[in-house]
Amino acid sequence: MIPAYWQQACQELSACDPVMRQLIAQFPGAALESRGCAFTTLARSIVGQQISVKAAESVWQKVIATLPGITPVMIAGVSEEQLRTCGLSARKAVYLQDLARHFTEGNLSETAWTEIDDEAIIGRLIKVKGIGRWTAEMFLIFHLQRPDVLPLDDIGLQRAISQHYVDKQAVGKAIMIELAKPWQPWRSVATWYLWRSLDPLPVAY
């Protein structure tokens, strides 16, 4: 599902920022898409922590091939050793099972997410082992499709901003926040196009 706001966001970003205008024109028809499953999005975000998009996809495909289904009940019921045979670290295997437990016990509620703001959702998600602010922000962008998320700790976003805006110099959070001000209220969309500029494989969680 493509966000209803995508076309408007692209038009407004193109109007306010020449770099955005170029990137949006470079990828016509491309857009963020939700997988439609909260558990899958969070699980893929955990798998993707601190590794490349390509490596994360490879591990995820092994998970799919090894397990008969990617559901909270299934993940909670398999052994840590089974998860590790898919290429997951011991730590990520533990994280996935803790995530599954939160879902099976009803601690994470899809209906509640629609009614609360971004920071409140982040606050709830970081109570799960292995979910920090970055993973929660990926959930906001990819599952809930919140339009104005700026994941300051994301290495890909840092690289892209460095490449496109500051002549490949290192960027800190203060610089990123300042550069992103014209993108509001569409910072998720700007972030997605900056990610897209780095990798032929679209980012997806």
Image (cartoon, rainbow, N blue to C red):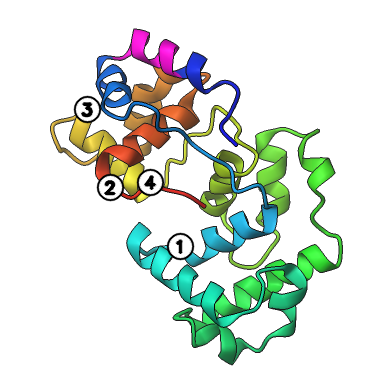
Judge from the rendering whether residue 174 lies leftward or rightward of residue 117; answer left or right: left
Residue 142 sits inside the magenta stretch: no
Whole-angstrom CA distance, mark 2 to mark 3, is: 17 Å
Whole-angstrom CA distance, mark 1 to mark 3, is: 25 Å
Circle 3 packing at 10 Å, graded few (<14), some (14-19), many (20+), is: few
Q: Which mark is residue 202?
A: 4
Q: Which mark is residue 199?
A: 2
The number of discs equals 4
Judge from the rendering whether residue 16 lies leftward or rightward of residue 92; answer left or right: left
Q: Amino acid at mark 4?
A: Pro
| Residue 193, position as x, y percentages in the image | 36, 33
Q: Is residue 92 above or below residue 111?
A: below
Disc 2 + disc 4, Cβ < 8 Å: yes
Residue 11 sits inside the magenta stretch: yes
Q: Amino acid at mark 1?
A: Gln
Question: SS class of the residue under badge 3?
Answer: helix
Q: Which mark is residue 49?
A: 1
Query: From where the camera sits, is residue 172 visible?
Result: no
Query: Which residues make up the magenta segment?
Result: 10-17
Q: Amino acid at mark 2?
A: Asp
Q: Which residue is mark 3?
A: 165
Question: SS class of the residue under badge 1?
Answer: loop
| Residue 108: quadrant of the picture | bottom right
User: 174 or 137: nearer the eye?
Assistant: 137
For the N terminus, the image quarter is: top right
Hey, which residue is sitting farthest top in the picture?
Answer: 15
Which residue lies at the image location 29% right of the left edge and 17% below the top edge?
Answer: 21
Q: Earlier in the sequence, mark 4 or mark 3?
A: 3
